[in-house]
Image: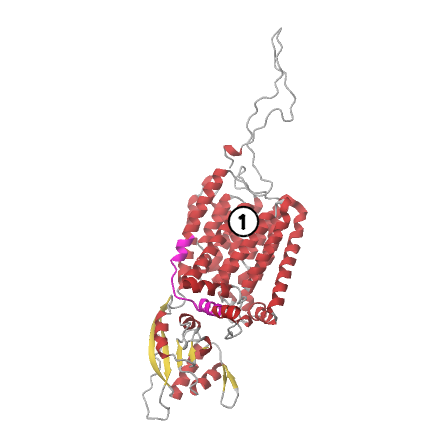
């Protein structure tokens, strides 16, 4: 609604002739050049985006600071030791950094199987880890996600107005993805930050007629986002299309040049990067993203998880699209960015809401829900502005129905808090395991450990805990005594019976099939004895980690008692 500062005063001289006033006999009255006209209040539409009053801008930004403060508090309450992906990227980044600076040989080709370039985020995280440890790297993720929320507010404000922007930021800031990713040392936060920055530049510069080439400055950020995490390419088409739709009411058909120019710039930059990286990066993109191995997760399960983590925002976004398409304003005098016609509004809504479905559809194609809880947040960034419109319309003009808005946002807050806490405790605190495992390590020895990335990270620098000494229960390629290569459960059984490992540690949870095979091989070989049972807890209850050590005496000596691992109930 317009304030006094938004009113327009029309002088009579504009477009009017001078008016002769009555005069008395013998007097000559001067002609009046102006007369007072009534103040006209009309809806103001800025020619290039949304330009509110200064008072409204200050109040809105103060409210945004409050939203960001709440997001930071809810994120920092999440505490746990390093997740396996965090540990993997950190020690891999340390080795990549050593290779780049000192030529130290890499222990593995990380570029061949990482789902992002190992010379980007892992190297950055390793440098930060050397300064401030895991806490500093997680702080980087928090700062990036706070910036994502602020940029979401900026985009929504430009496309609609302050009220929709605040509602959008308030919904996104308490979502499980924003909170969970905001305290996780993986490249998800960095990738989303770069995508958000690219979107902000592209959308906000789309309607500035004198500076339209600035749109292309968003291309390097989008290309870098894809390089940081290859799955970021899923959202590049949305960034390409949005500036054309956003700038249509001001620049007309000229905006049709934006999408092809943007996509061409991103493609050229990525082609140059692949040329520099070599064929190994092409293999990694194929194996981890475009032609990833199919999983076994049912589509119904993926849809259920998607609804749990992003359903409320998606529903509000659909409501926002319907109401915004039908009527551009909540009330006739509402200040709002140039809305254009219904076709333009419907297209804008379809693109923004459709983006939130990209991650679930992609993972349904792969039949896996791995990282879905993080990828949902990428689509929510694009759908949240329209969800903000939906929430604002539900509240109504002049806050007619505030109780509905408060109830919906409270539901989003409760879901985000509970879901992010559960996800952040999906893995057990690894301190007891690392302490129990470390006394049994020795230089040049080999270990078979379930999720070895965590002890490798926490024991880095020790000569008896180098990455090459650890094998994972996920896969194996064991070379037998006759030179044959055995993989899978057969390889695990043969390696255990041959006494290939000094220490074996597993928990019967992450790779249950391999763990069962290993336990049977241990029981039949009599080469190992159980030295520790580590009791751990995660979000789902108690669990046990079994640590076996290779016997020092030959297996044919006098019989010794053998302890089978107790069953987990």
Q: Main secondary structure of the magenta part?
A: helix
- Crowd class of label 1 (few under 14; some 14 to 19; many from 20; radius 10 Å): many
Residue 293 appears in the picture as rendered: no
Name the foreground residue: 449 vs 363: 449
- Image vertical order of residue 514 relative to residue 348, above or below: below
Residue 366 appears in the picture as rendered: yes
Q: Residue at x 37, y 81 (%)?
A: 548
242 in the magenta segment: no
91 in the magenta segment: yes
Mark 1, residue position: 155
> Residue 270 at what x, y percent from top left?
61, 63
Residue interval drawn in magenta: 71-93
How many marks overall? 1
Instruction: Single out the residue that lies furthest toward the front.
Output: 102
> Residue 265 at what x, y percent from top left?
64, 58
Q: Is 190 positioned to the left or the right of 75 in the image?
A: right
Name the foreground residue: 500 vs 78: 500
Q: Residue at x 47, y 76 (%)?
A: 474
> Residue 183 at what x, y percent from top left?
43, 60
């Amino acid at each position: 609604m317009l304030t006094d500062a938004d009113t327009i005063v029309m002088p009579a001289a504009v477009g009017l002739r001078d008016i002769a006033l009555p005069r008395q006999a013998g007097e000559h009255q001067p002609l009046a050049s102006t007369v007072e006209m009534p103040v006209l209040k009309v809806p103001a539409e800025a020619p290039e985006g949304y330009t509110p009053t200064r008072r409204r801008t200050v109040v809105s930004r103060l409210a945004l600071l409050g939203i960001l403060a709440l997001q930071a508090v809810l994120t920092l309450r999440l505490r746990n030791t390093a997740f396996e992906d965090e540990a993997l990227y950190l020690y891999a980044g340390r080795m990549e950094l050593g290779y780049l600076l000192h030529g130290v040989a890499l222990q593995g080709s990380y570029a061949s199987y990482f789902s992002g370039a190992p010379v980007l985020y892992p190297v950055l995280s390793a440098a930060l880890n050397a300064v401030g440890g895991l806490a500093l790297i997680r702080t980087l993720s928090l700062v990036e996600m706070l910036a994502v929320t602020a940029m979401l507010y900026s985009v929504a404000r430009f496309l609609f107005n302050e009220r929709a922007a605040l509602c959008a930021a308030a919904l996104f800031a308490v979502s499980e993805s924003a909170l969970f990713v905001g305290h996780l040392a993986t490249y998800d936060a960095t990738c989303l930050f770069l995508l958000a920055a690219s979107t902000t530049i592209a959308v906000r510069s789309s309607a500035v007629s004198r500076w339209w080439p600035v749109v292309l400055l968003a291309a390097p950020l989008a290309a870098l986002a894809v390089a940081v995490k290859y799955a970021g390419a899923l959202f590049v088409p949305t960034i390409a299309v949005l500036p054309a739709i956003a700038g249509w009411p001001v620049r007309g058909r000229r905006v049709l040049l934006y999408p092809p120019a943007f996509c061409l710039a991103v493609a050229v930059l990525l082609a140059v990067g692949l040329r520099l990286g070599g064929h190994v990066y092409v293999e990694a993109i194929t194996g981890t993203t475009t032609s990833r191995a199919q999983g076994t997760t049912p589509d119904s399960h993926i849809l259920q998880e998607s609804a749990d983590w992003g359903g409320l925002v998606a529903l509000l976004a659909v409501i926002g699209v319907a109401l915004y398409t039908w009527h551009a304003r909540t009330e006739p005098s509402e200040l709002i960015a140039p809305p254009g016609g219904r076709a333009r509004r419907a297209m804008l809504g379809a693109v923004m809401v459709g983006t939130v479905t990209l991650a679930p559809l992609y993972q349904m194609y792969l039949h896996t829900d791995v990282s879905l809880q993080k990828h949902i947040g990428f689509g929510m960034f694009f759908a949240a502005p329209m969800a903000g419109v939906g929430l604002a319309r539900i509240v109504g003009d002049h806050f007619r129905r505030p109780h509905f808005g408060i109830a919906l946002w409270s539901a989003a807050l409760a879901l985000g808090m509970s879901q992010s806490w559960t996800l952040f405790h999906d893995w057990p605190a690894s301190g007891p395991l690392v302490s129990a495992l470390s006394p049994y390590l020795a230089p040049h020895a080999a270990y078979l450990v379930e999720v070895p990335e965590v002890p490798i990270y926490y024991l880095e620098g020790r000569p008896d805990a180098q990455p090459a000494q650890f094998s994972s229960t996920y896969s194996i390629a064991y070379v037998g005594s006759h030179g044959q290569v055995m993989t899978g459960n057969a390889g695990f059984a043969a390696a255990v019976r041959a006494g290939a490992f000094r220490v074996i540690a597993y928990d019967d949870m992450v790779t249950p099939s391999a763990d069962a095979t290993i336990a049977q091989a241990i029981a039949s070989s009599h080469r190992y004895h159980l030295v520790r049972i580590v009791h751990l807890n995660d979000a789902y209850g108690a669990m046990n980690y079994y640590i076996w050590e290779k016997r020092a005496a030959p297996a044919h000596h006098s019989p010794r008692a053998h302890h089978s691992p107790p069953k987990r109930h």
